[in-house]
Image: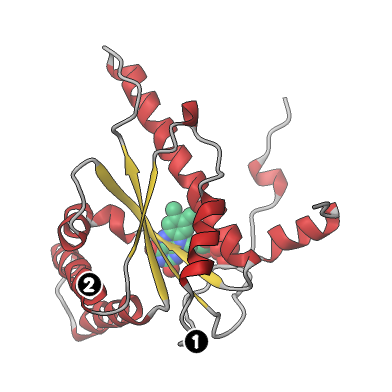
Amino acid sequence: MKLESEDLYEFLLSRRSIREFRDTPVSEAVLRRMLHAACYAPSAHNRQPWRFVIVEWGETRAEFARAMSARYRSDLSRDDNLTQQLEERIRARETRLIEAPALIVLCMTTKDMNTYPDDKRTQAERSMTIQSVALAGMQLLLAVHAEGLGACWMGAPLFAQQEVRDSLQLEPAWEPQAMFLIGEPLAPGEDRGRRSLEEVVLWR
Ligand SMILES: Cc1cc2nc3c(=O)[nH]c(=O)nc-3n(C[C@H](O)[C@H](O)[C@H](O)COP(=O)(O)O)c2cc1C
């Protein structure tokens, strides 16, 4: 397929994080097509360290959401007193997870990483593994956009890795990195703006 570059740029620049969805479910066929595209991300040594967990609607999703809330509540209570307002924020987030048409947890497996005798190379290898998984996440966001759906990358599983593993019965080598809520957008996403190129690019 030949894409006009203008169309591709328009596609890239029109993706937005979407946080509220219509009730319409996302079919298994569409989920599979998007995940297949995500798996075409490049990865260090082509190890493909990404792993995906589709958390289905129902009791598993509810248990997952409750476990995430428990961690969130405990973290927030260490920062501050748990006010009524914070409790409402926790409950609202839990409801958002339970109700999202589709929810995918993105994990990283460290099983296939190269091993080195020194910390410096071990750390670099780990960073490359994280980068590879993030690219699969980005590719998933683009596939969602290509389907005319919306999604938001959410970092919460990184802060609740054990709770995610326990509630979804994942093996210890799967490190939860992020999750994506996916569905038909309730409204167009807001343009949050970008820093200017002058601010982020150096020419040397
Ligand atoms: C690593 C990462 C973590 C993020 N975590 C969250 C999150 O926990 N909650 C949330 O609402 N959005 C989260 N986002 C989405 C960002 O807020 C969003 O990408 C940013 O504001 C730019 O908006 P845009 O995606 O619509 O261009 C995350 C994005 C990334 C890349």
Q: How packed is label 1: few (under 14 Cα within 10 Å), some, or many (20 or more)? A: few
Q: Residue at x 17, y 53 (%)?
A: 162
Locate residue 160 relative to residue 17 in the image: left or right.
left
Image coloring type: secondary structure
Residue 114 figure quarter: top left
x and y percentages locating residue 78 in the rendered image: 14, 62
Q: Tag on residue 60?
A: 2
Of the two numbered discs 1 and 2 in the rendering, the one whose residue sits closer to the viewer: 2
Q: Position of residue 23 (x, y in %)?
A: 45, 87
- Answer above or below: position of 84 versus 168: below
Instruction: State the residue position of label 1.
Output: 22
Who's the residue at 30% across and 15% down the image?
116
Q: Is residue 143 left or right of residue 133?
A: right
**Which numbered dot is residue 78?**
none
Q: Quadrant of residue 155?
A: bottom left
The disc labelled 2 sits on which kind of residue?
Thr
Name the N-terminal-most of marks 1 and 2: 1
